[in-house]
Image: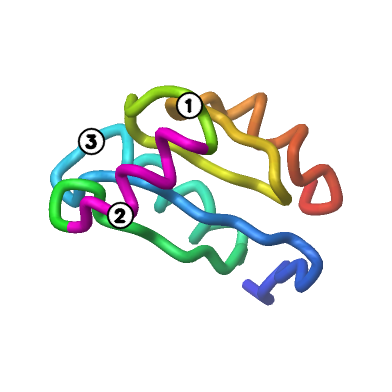
Amino acid sequence: MPCKCVPSVDVAIYNMPASLEGQEVRHFFNSKGVHYEEFDVSADPQALQRLRELSGQTDRPGIVVNDRVYIGFDRSQLESAVPSLF
């Protein structure tokens, strides 16, 4: 299947590696061919602080798509955040 990469989409995931919900987020973006940067908040206190600054909380996963913050995996929200993929 060809990559549907969207170079203008900037995605960051703030997560813990063992999180099941975080695994769903990674699978979602991987299946859509969307490149993302992932930060392990359990090993990187600065990443946890950035998540707190961005969202006002530390719930995970925290997902930032083009400067918009989403907490938790909600497929419909993420699909609407990156409509050019669908």
Q: Mark 1 or mark 2: which is in front?
A: 2
Specify the principal SS of the magenta part: helix
Q: CA distance from mark 3 to mark 2?
A: 22 Å
Q: Residue at 74% of width from left, 60% of height from top?
A: 9
For residue 35: magenta?
no
- Could you give the CA–CA distance between mark 1 and mark 2, rounded to whole angstroms? 18 Å
**Mark 1 or mark 2: which comes first in sequence?**
2
* Above-or-below relation of 25 to 38: above
Which mark, by number, is residue 84? none
What residue did someone put label 3 on? 20
Front residue of 18/59: it is: 59
Question: Was residue 49 drawn as part of the magenta stretch in this picture?
Answer: yes
- Look at mark 2 in the image and give the residue it sits on: 46
Q: Residues within 10 Å of mark 1 (few under 14, many from 20)?
A: some
Q: Disc 1 designates what residue?
A: 71
Classify residue 3 as left or right of residue 42.
right
Q: Which residues are magenta?
A: 44-53
Q: Is residue 30 above or below residue 50?
A: below
Picture coordinates of residue 31, whole percent (x, y): 53, 57
Picture quadrant of residue 6: bottom right
Marks 2 and 1: in contact by CB < 8 Å? no
At label 2, which amino acid type do we have? Gln
Q: Nearer the viewer, residue 16 or 20?
A: 16
Kind of residue indicated by mark 3: Leu
Question: Hey, which quadrant is residue 38 in on the image?
Answer: bottom left
Q: Secondary structure at mark 1?
A: strand
- Number of other residues with Cα within 10 Å of mark 2, as a class: few under 14, some 14 to 19, many 20 or more: few
Q: Nearer the viewer, residue 84 or 66?
A: 66
Q: Residue at x 40, y 23 (%)?
A: 57
Taking the image as shown, residue 23 lies to the left or right of residue 65, namely left
